[in-house]
Amino acid sequence: MPRPTVKNVRQQQLIDATLMSIERHGLQNTTINTISGLAGMSSGIISHYFGGKQGLIEATQKFLLEELKQALLTRTSGKTLTPIDRLSMIVEANFTELQRSTAATKTWLSFWSQAMHDPGLARLQNINSQRLYSNLLFSFKQLLPNAAAVSAAKQTAAVIDGFWLRSALSATPIEDFKQAQILSKAFIKAVIVHNGVE
Amino acid sequence: MPRPTVKNVRQQQLIDATLMSIERHGLQNTTINTISGLAGMSSGIISHYFGGKQGLIEATQKFLLEELKQALLTRTSGKTLTPIDRLSMIVEANFTELQRSTAATKTWLSFWSQAMHDPGLARLQNINSQRLYSNLLFSFKQLLPNAAAVSAAKQTAAVIDGFWLRSALSATPIEDFKQAQILSKAFIKAVIVHNGVE
DNA sequence: TGTTGTTAATTGAACGCTCAATTAATAACG
DNA sequence: CGTTATTAATTGAGCGTTCAATTAACAACA
C-alpha cells in the first residue's frame, strides 16, 4: 500500500477543487484562480503540480474515467455473479453518485467536445466507450446466441448512454437518473426474455 | 413569401461561418476573428447583427434546433403515413447530414455543457428533448397499449440519443452513424413485435 | 438622367479586461 | 542550513467590445 505523499494529496485536492469549480461556474468560467481558491491554495501551485491548467483538466477527466472503471471492479471482482446480476452491476457502475453529480456531468460533456479535436483525449474516450460495450457483450454471450448478444450489447450500451445523457440534461435530474437506472435494467431483462433460447 | 433582407442574409452567413469555425477549431478556440474571417467580413459586424459573440453562438444553436424540427416536418406534414413509417421518419430526422456533421456534433456537445448553467439554454434543450419523446409517444400509442407505449417511447428516445452520441464520439463516425440509424429502426420494430397486441 | 441629400451597412484600430504563466520571495521541514 | 513546498506579485498575450470613419445603396428632385 503506497503511503500518500504530499504530492499525491495536493494533486487529489486540486482535482476535487476542479470538479467543485466546474460544478459552480462551468468549465468555461473555471480559472486557475477559482480552482486554487476553492482548494485554499495559491494559483501557482497548479503549474507546479500539473504543468499548467490544461494538465489539471486532463488529470480530472482521467480521474472520472478511472473511477468509472473501479466502480465496476469493486462490484464484480472476487464475487461469483450470475450473468444477469453482472449486467445489473454494469448499469449501477454507470450511475454511481459521482457519475450523476453535476460536476461530473458538466465535465463529461465538456470533455467530449474537446475530445473531438484532441487525439489524446479521443483515444481515452474510445477506450472507455469500448469498455462498456465489451463488458456488456461478455455477459450477454452467456445468455444469448452470439449474433443476438452482439446486437443486445450495442443496444444496451446506447440505452445506458442515452438515458444517462437525457437525465443529465433533464430539468429534474435526480428523479430521472433514478428512473434511468430502473429502465435500463428493465430493458436488459426484456432483451434477454425476447431473444433467449427457451 | 418574405423576401430575404440584407440582415437575414448576413445573419445566416455568420451562422454558417460559426459552424465552420467550430468544426475547424472547436468552440474553445473560436473567436470573433476566426468567424468573421471565414465569413469574409470584419469583426465588428458580429456585434452589429447579434449584439456580441454570445448572441451569435446562441443563434447558431437555435438554428440547429430549428433545422431538427423542420427535418421532421418536411418528412411528415401533408403525407399519410403508417405509425411505423412515421417512427422511421423520426429516426431519419435525427440523423440528417447536418446533424451528423462534425460542426453540429461539436456544437451540440458544447451547447449542452453550457446549458447546464444557463437557464435560457436549458429551457431550449428541454423543449427539444421533450419533443423527441412526444413524437415517439404519439406514434407508439397507435400501435401499443398505453403503458407499453410510454415505456417504448422512453426507451426509443434513449436509444436514438445514445446511438447518436456514441457515433459522434466514435473513431469511425461515418460508418457508425449509418449503423446507428439501422439499429435504431431495428429496435423500434422489435419493441412493437414484442409488446403489440397479437 | 444627373446631381445631391440621406440612410443603411461595414470597417478596423484602439481600449480595457481577463487570465495563464512566470518569477522572486517566503515558509516549512528535516 | 539546505531543500522542498508554497505564496504573492507581475507580466504579457489574447480576447470581445466599442465607436468614429468610410463606403455603398437608395431617394428626391429638376
Image (cartoon, coloured by chain):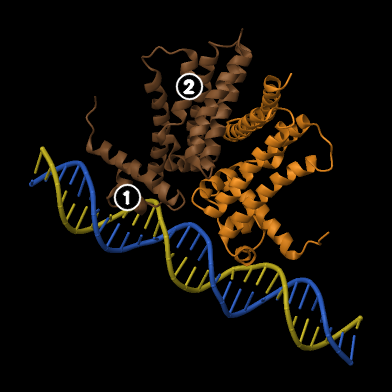
Chain colours: A brown, B orange, C yellow, D blue
From this view, report whether residue A197 is shown above or below residue D21. Answer: above
Residue A88's mark?
A: 2
Q: Is residue A119 above or below residue B34?
A: above
Do the numbered discs 2 and 1 sit on residues whose CB atoms are within 8 Å? no
Which residue position holds label 1?
Answer: A38
Q: Is residue A81 left or right of residue A198?
A: left
B152 and B21: which is toward the camera: B152
Circle 1: residue type: Leu
Looking at this view, is A17 or A179 the one in front?
A179
Residue lying at 63% horizontally and 14% vertically, measured from the top left: A195
Which residue is nearer to you in this view: A144 or D21? A144
Secondary element type, mark 1 = helix
CA distance for labels 2 and 1: 37 Å
* Secondary structure beneath label 2: helix
Amino acid identity at mark 2: Ser
- The local crowd at label 1, few if under 14, some if 14 to 19, many if 20 or more residues have their Cα within 10 Å, is some
- Image quadrant holding the C terminus of chain A, namely top right
The x and y percentages for residue D6 are 23, 49
Residue at x-position 67% and y-position 59%: B40
Is residue A115 in view from this perspective? Answer: no
User: Is C24 on the left-hand or right-hand side of B192?
Assistant: left
Q: Quadrant of residue C25?
A: bottom left
In terms of sequence position, does the residue under pointer 2 or pointer 1 come before the other? 1
Q: How many numbered dots are placed on residues in this image?
A: 2
